[in-house]
Amino acid sequence: MKFKKLILLDKVTMQGNQENELRELAEETEIFRDNPKNKEEAIKRIGNSDAIITSWVDIDRKVIDSCPNLKYIGIWATGYSWIDVEYAKKKGIIVTNVPAYATESVAELVFGQLISLIRKTRQADEAARKGRHEFEKFMGEELKDKTLGIIGLGRIGTRVAEIANAFEMNVIYFSRTRKPEQESKGIRYEKLEDLVKKSDIITLHASSKEELITPKLIEQTKQGAIVINMGVGRSVNEDVLIKNVNSGKIRAILDVYKDNKIDRGIRDATRKNTLLTPHIGFYTRQAIFRLTQTCTENARSYLEGKTKNKVN
């Protein structure tokens, strides 16, 4: 069994033979290499297809109602808040995602960026390239014995905790549900407010769409604390965060942003207190290969009548 028409709706990175493997799933396959400019263009691209693979295109009621032949949506990502999965279910459309493909990539970037910030490697690199042998300007800090507060102890948060233990950090966490197995390994549970007050470094890995780090909580952080967000952009109140970064109270490492937009205020934040990246946490060769491979396997499993990684 094959799809009649499969659309790759936006940017999907394929390596090796992966494009051919996807094409084999359908009688006809159309691949778009850029993002649709608006909802109307997305609807036009989907047309009469019965299956799509998409990364971050909004698929809401209007899109679903405009594409009556659609039966399968494969998400080239873990998150799916931009897909109306419940309405899709009512319309008989199966939606799948790709869990756990970038655990190592994100966790490693947390510590790569963290060490870069506290050891001032960006500034030191700039000085060295100008021929300035001035180590005195780049006094850094050690991670050992610092308290790391993890918000969201899923797969990525748990891996971050494991790496932190190797650095001999004190690890505490907040999660919607307690994690007895991790607590047995010495990771201590704290209420969110207490975690914020006690942590030298706060790292967010929760999938929640609500604002977790509110203005009130930001005001309660330690002087010099570091806030890392590689989870969901809207988890942090960006305006108040940047205000406190610019005042010198806290530092920030950001890879995700509210509404996927890097606002001017963030771009202009004090450089010595910030490290910004444009959502590269997941983007390694190994993770992207796993992502596309699993996305293909999800679509194949749907065709075989035993759908994997279904979210609705």
Image (cartoon, rainbow, N blue to C red):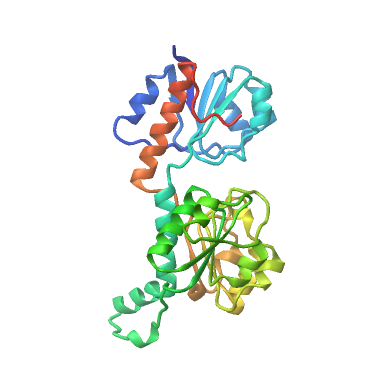
Q: Eyeballing the image, is 161 above or below 20? A: below
Is 170 in front, or is 148? 170
Q: Quadrant of residue 301?
A: top left
On the rendered image, what quadrant is the N terminus found in?
Answer: top left
Residue 150 versus residue 80: which sits nearer the camera? 150
- Quadrant housing residue 58: top right
Residue at the image point whose x is 58% and y is 38% from the top:
80
* Residue drawn at x 50%, y 23% as measured from the top left: 307
Q: Is residue 284 above or below residue 265?
A: above
Residue 106 pos. (x, y %): 44, 53
* Residue 280 seen from this side: no
101 w.r.t. 45: above or below: below
Q: Position of residue 310 (x, y in %)?
A: 54, 29
Q: In this rendering, does residue 225 appear at all?
A: yes
Q: How many marks?
A: 0
Asked if 111 appears above or below 177 in the picture, the reply is below
Asked if residue 283 lies left or right of residue 203, the reply is left
Residue farthest along the top direction in this orientation:
1
Left or right of 174: which side holds 14? left
Locate the C terminus and report the quarter of the image it occupies.
top right
Compare residues 202 and 118 and report the one nearer the observer.
Answer: 202
- Point out residue 271 in the picture as x, y percentages from the top left corner: 50, 73
Viewer-proximal residue, 303 or 261? 303
Residue reaching furthest front? 184
**x and y, in percent, of residue 304 in the image:** 45, 16
